[in-house]
Amino acid sequence: MHANPVKIALAERRPGIGCWLTLGSPANAELLAHCGFDWLLIDQEHGPAGTGTLLQQLRAIDAARAHGATPGVVVRLPAHDPALVKQAMDSGVASLMFPAVESAEQARRLAGAMRYPLGDNGGSRGIAGIVRAARYGLDPDYIAGANAQACTIVQIETPKGVEQARAIARVDGVDCLFVGPADLSFGLGHPGDLEHPRVRAALDEVLAAAAEAGKACGMFALSAAEAARFREAGFHMISLHSDAAWLARGARAALAEYRGGA
């Protein structure tokens, strides 16, 4: 199987820029795969992508890769459910993001759910060889190599998650702490205000926790300027908003230009 570019970049703590896929559209996924992002995230938590739609988007991204595109792929699951982990990974996804992780024990279970029980590694992923990830049984080496490519990204998006960030970051198998800024700012009583001292202190706490454990840290940005500020602050895995945002912004900007010149 191929090396996981998302995991490699996170291990090297190399800044990378990605984009959220929220509309469940294979066409959007294919188009954005050609745009030069380091990774694309298929959102199953707040998006319509079920297993069938996930497969369609993965195949669309693979089609773009056949023409030279190189983005890694991440799937954000809607819950901490091992059954969902199996479905996503059997579909061919090696990097998963989990929402609202609040303890080291949660993180440990999630990392284990992504790994086959080979040796004493705490893995609990169910084994099936005739799946898309293993080229439907045509890759005899898939199971032996899958654990090394598994990439576990945990979201810190509650005050409790921030309090436990250092313990979570130290869990073997966790590759990245990814801040959920909307939920976190709401939980701290300052919705959407990332400049409020309480919110800024929480962001600094998560950054410090990740750095002390030698792990990468991620963040969702609403604009290119905000993404650049997060990169300068020390975040590595940065999302440059979403397919829905760029579609809406492009349409509104074109309409404003047209109507302004009428």
Image (cartoon, grey):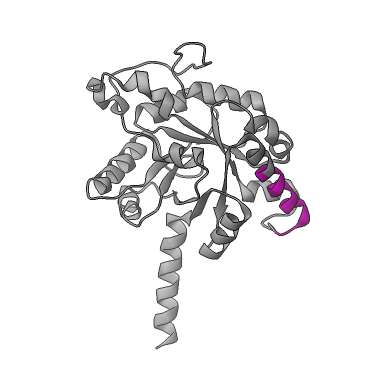
Q: Position of residue 170 (x, y in %)?
A: 64, 29
Q: Residue furthest top?
A: 119
Look at the image and give the residue range highlighted in magenta.
Answer: 195-207
Q: How many circles with numbers are drawn on the protein?
A: 0
Position of the N terminus by quadrant? top left
User: Can residue 12 be seen here?
Assistant: yes
Q: Main secondary structure of the magenta part?
A: helix
Residue 201 falls within the magenta-colored stretch: yes
- 237 and 88: which one is in front? 237
Residue displayed at 41% across by 69% down = 251
Q: Is residue 245 left or right of residue 167?
A: left
Residue displayed at 55% across by 51% down = 220
Residue displayed at 54% across by 48% down = 236
User: Can residue 77 be seen here?
Assistant: no
Position of the C terminus by quadrant? bottom left
Q: Image quarter for residue 164?
A: top right
Residue 262, compared with residue 212, is above or below; it is below
Q: Position of residue 187 (x, y in %)?
A: 72, 45
Residue displayed at 38% across by 24% down = 146
Q: Is residue 201 left or right of residue 226?
A: right
Residue 176, compared with residue 170, is above or below; it is below
Q: Position of residue 241 (x, y in %)?
A: 50, 56
Residue 170, compared with residue 209, is above or below; it is above
Q: Position of residue 126 (x, y in %)?
A: 42, 16
Q: Is residue 145 left or right of residue 166?
A: left
